């Protein structure tokens, strides 16, 4: 059949319009401990009902949906977790990411009001979006408790890709829980690191630093890097997973500020949710950019060519573009002339 002969229907559109139902099923499964119950051997509807403290009928409803979503597998009356679910959504496992799955739940209402958010005038947008004067230590602690395991995974991935042997000091812009610096301090004897973030976040960062026992070489200091001066004694700079929160002029200025502050021969790694140069995806960075409308920020999804351009304009050399996490994160690297 020729493509022109194919019947156009609404199946795809209906699936997208109801995608929130899949999110709800996943979040409820996490909240009720469904995947943990299955992992612990409560892998039938009746057994899971007891472990989850809900009616068997509701377990059946949930498990049928989770099976259709390929989050769990069914063999007769017994269920097993999909591989990624078993790794990341079983409580008690070091890689447990349940809090991260649930972190977006309070934002449902905001996304439900996306149409109104998109009608907001430029003068009513906030430069730092969710990180305005209402951002508190409690909110910072909640956010980084949810994202810490994911952040540590990203930090380990970074340090497998990038060799910092011989480097003396890292400055991490918007480093949050300090994962990139904590992992570096544990890997490289003699390397020091400084996390730069807003005041409520720094309070939480210091807690993670102390918890990891690296307070002798990793510090956290208050800095709004969109306008404050940066340390001038670092030969490595990192900015990770906060790119879409800012507009193009701000990122361009940050990259220039980093270049000016780095020691000669220093390197800068910008890790962010970047769309392709055609502006057609990937979906995850595109949706992150759209989410900034919900945050009333001026941010958006930057393209890889945008980011390379920021580096070129600042004066960086040996600029490279590297896939960090497929379809999600890209790493742009540049070096300051020695």
Image (cartoon, rainbow, N blue to C red):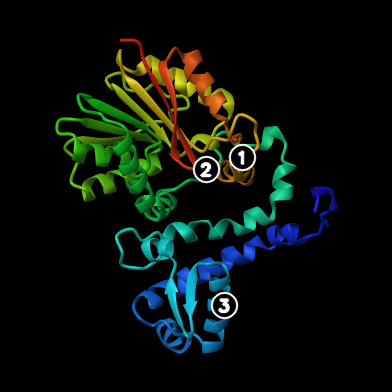
178 w.r.t. 148: above or below: above
Q: Residue 327 carries which label?
A: 2
Nearest the eye: 110 or 270: 270
Q: Is residue 182 left or right of residue 320?
A: left
Q: In this view, does 224 lie to the left or right of 16?
A: left
Contact (Cβ within 8 Å) of mark 2 with mark 1: yes
**Other-residue count near label 1 (Cα within 10 Å), few / some / many at <14 / 14–19 / ≥20:** some
Contact (Cβ within 8 Å) of mark 3 with mark 2: no
Cα–Cα span, label 3 and label 2: 29 Å
What residue is drawn where x is 41% and y is 37%?
198
209 w.r.t. 34: above or below: above
Nearest the eye: 141 or 325: 325
| Residue that carries the numbered disc 3 in the rendered image | 64
83 w.r.t. 309: above or below: below
Query: x, y percentage for residue 2?
Result: 81, 50
Quadrant of the rendering where the C terminus is positioned:
top left
Dot 3 or dot 2: first in sequence order is 3
Contact (Cβ within 8 Å) of mark 1 with mark 3: no
**Other-residue count near label 2 (Cα within 10 Å), few / some / many at <14 / 14–19 / ≥20:** some
- For residue 98, say whether it is visible: no
72 w.r.t. 243: above or below: below
Q: In this view, does 29 lie to the left or right of 299?
A: left
Dot 1 or dot 3: first in sequence order is 3
Cα–Cα span, label 1 and label 3: 32 Å
């Amino acid at each position: 059949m020729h493509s022109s002969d194919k019947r156009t229907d609404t199946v795809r559109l209906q699936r997208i319009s109801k995608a929130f139902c899949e999110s709800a099923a996943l979040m409820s499964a996490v909240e009720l401990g469904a995947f943990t119950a299955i992992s612990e051997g409560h892998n039938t509807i009746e057994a899971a009902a007891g472990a989850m403290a809900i009616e068997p009928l509701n377990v059946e409803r949930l498990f049928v949906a989770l099976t259709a979503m390929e989050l769990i597998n069914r063999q007769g009356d017994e269920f097993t977790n999909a591989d990624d679910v078993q790794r990341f959504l079983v409580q008690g496992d070091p890689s447990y990411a349940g809090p991260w799955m649930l972190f977006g739940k309070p934002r449902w209402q905001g996304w439900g009001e996306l149409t109104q958010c998109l009608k907001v005038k430029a003068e009513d947008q906030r430069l730092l979006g969710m990180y305005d004067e209402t951002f508190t230590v409690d909110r910072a602690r909640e956010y980084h408790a949810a994202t810490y395991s994911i952040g540590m995974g990203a930090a380990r991935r970074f340090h497998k890709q990038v060799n910092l042997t011989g480097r003396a000091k890292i400055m991490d812009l918007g480093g949050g829980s300090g994962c990139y610096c904590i992992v570096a301090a544990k890997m490289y004897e003699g390397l020091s690191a400084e996390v730069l973030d807003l005041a409520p976040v720094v309070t939480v960062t210091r807690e993670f630093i102390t918890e990891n026992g690296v307070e002798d070489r990793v510090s956290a200091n208050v800095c709004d890097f969109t306008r404050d001066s940066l340390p001038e004694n670092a030969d490595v700079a990192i900015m990770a997973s906060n790119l879409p929160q800012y507009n193009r002029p701000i990122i361009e200025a940050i990259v220039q500020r980093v270049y000016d502050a780095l020691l000669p021969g220093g390197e800068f790694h910008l890790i962010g949710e970047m769309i392709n140069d055609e502006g057609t995806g990937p979906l995850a960075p595109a949706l992150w950019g759209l989410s900034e409308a919900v945050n009333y920020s001026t941010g958006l999804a930057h393209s890889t060519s945008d980011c390379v351009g920021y580096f070129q304009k600042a004066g960086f050399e040996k600029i490279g573009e590297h896939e960090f996490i497929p379809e999600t994160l890209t790493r742009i690297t540049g070096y300051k002339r020695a």
